[in-house]
Amino acid sequence: MAKDKKQPRPKAETPKGFRDYFGQDVTERRDMLDRIAQVYHRHGFDPLETSAVETVEALGKFLPDVDRPNAGVFAWQEEAVPGGGTAGDWLALRYDLTAPLARVAAQYRNDLPSPYRRFAMGPVWRNEKPGPGRFRQFYQCDADTVGSASVAADAEICGMLADALEAVGIDRGDYLVRINNRKVLNGVLEAAQVREDQAEDVLRQIDKFDKVGREGVLALLTTGRLDDSGARIDGVGLSEAQAGPVLAFLEAKGADNAATLDNLSAAVGGSAIGAEGVDELRQIAAMLAAMGVAEDRAVIDPAVVRGLGYYTGPVFEAELTFEILDEKGRKRQFGSVAGGGRYDGLVERFTGQKVPATGVSIGVDRLLAALRAKGLAGAEVAGPVVVTVMDRDRMSDYQSMAADLRAAGIRAEVYLGNPKNFGNQLKYADKRGAPVAIIQGGDEAERGVVQVKDLILGAKIAAEASVEEWKSQPAQTEVARADLVAEVRRIIG
């Protein structure tokens, strides 16, 4: 009788496009998000946690391909199981934090206050091709106001975003919240007599303003241009006269908000929707000033064109203005870390009624990378105080020491490996990043004292070092057992 073949061992590796986060990464992200959450809480926003799984129907237009429900998202069909959903229903891991908000706002519309102000932080999943720095699971941090058409809600989001950046350590002068309005662009398109079938093409070309400049955008709006490789890029087909208002819009940034708003008024000409957009920006600027948010923190800027195809009113992004070195050692500006704006149709898919909403999303990984680039994160996180074990029969004494330290708010643990080789305990303390190690052998116990070793000041000890060699280090002191907590607190500050 043939023996069953052994099953191959599974590979110990993460799936492609995913990563593991260890102690320091998790701690830094949590600390950053806690600071942001405190700002949102002070502004009256409530936290919301939704299920990681949504119905594909609820995701709706947020799906990249509605004809293939599992394209772009991690989705599966329900089976006929007791207590489960209807067999054949499609479920998916949430693609972002906006679709769950839409579902919540509709599902609990009779119970939630209106407007409803919430913030949400957590992982989202996208079944897309991974690449360098591009993962299929990542964190988002959103804040939205649902149910208010007032631009005061937009102004509050912008001011709150500035406060959040400062709360995590970004100094004034190192960031700028830039604000624009889709209605202004609609007015510009109207003034330029752009046909409806040309509008999306015009949006795509003006999005390239930062890269190709005035003349490049002019060529793209009109007859076309050659790219860097010499390939021909077709133009939209506008006349130079039609392109004039679009270029005026892109170059409307003035010395201050007042000048910029005057330039935008000229760019929209006689367009009613354009004038409405300019007036909204004027109100936002006035409210930000009243909130104490000066123009060195948030400013009206027509160059914000990303997302204008999605948003229906004010649109804003937070840009970090300090320089960093790229992979090739070249200086470059860090760039955008957050974006948002006003959008309609959030809840309409569920209720049939338009519900105005505005919100912002912070790129968690990107902001954390910025903090590390500024030296505001990434420093080595101190590990726990390690209580070493010299006599396994006295484990209760060692646990008592750790308990006293914890009661005083000091992170501490007892070494729980094999205590036979003291060198292994030292290796463990070093790998844990322990700032202090505690030693108490039988002699110290009889005399009612402990040895407190300052590992921050002391040299790293080789695994072979004996107890006697370790005790001889100058950073080690002997104190009464009753003074253990005070001595540790003195060392770690």
Image (spheres, rainbow, N blue to C red):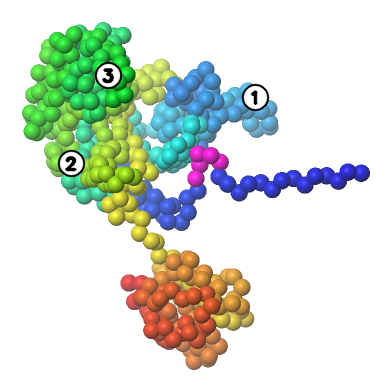
Q: Locate residue 179: give its quadrant.
A: top left
User: Does the magenta portion include 336?
Assistant: no
Q: Distance between the residues labelled 3 and 1?
A: 54 Å
Give the answer, above or below, for where 398 lies relative to 262: below
Asked whether residue 459 appears in the rendered view, the answer is: yes
Give the answer, above or below, for where 353 lies relative to 302: above
**Mark in front: 1 vs 2:** 2
Q: Provide the residue span drawn in magenta.
A: 15-19
Amino acid type, label 1: Ala
Q: In the current view of this chain or complex, which residue is farthest to the front?
A: 230
Residue nearer the viewer, 54 or 43: 54
Amino acid type, label 2: Arg
- Mark number displayed over residue 87: 1
For label 2, the residue is 297
**Mark in front: 2 vs 3:** 3
**Mark in front: 3 vs 1:** 3
The picture places residue 358, in percent across and down from the top left corner, at 30, 30
Q: Distance between the residues labelled 2 and 3?
A: 38 Å
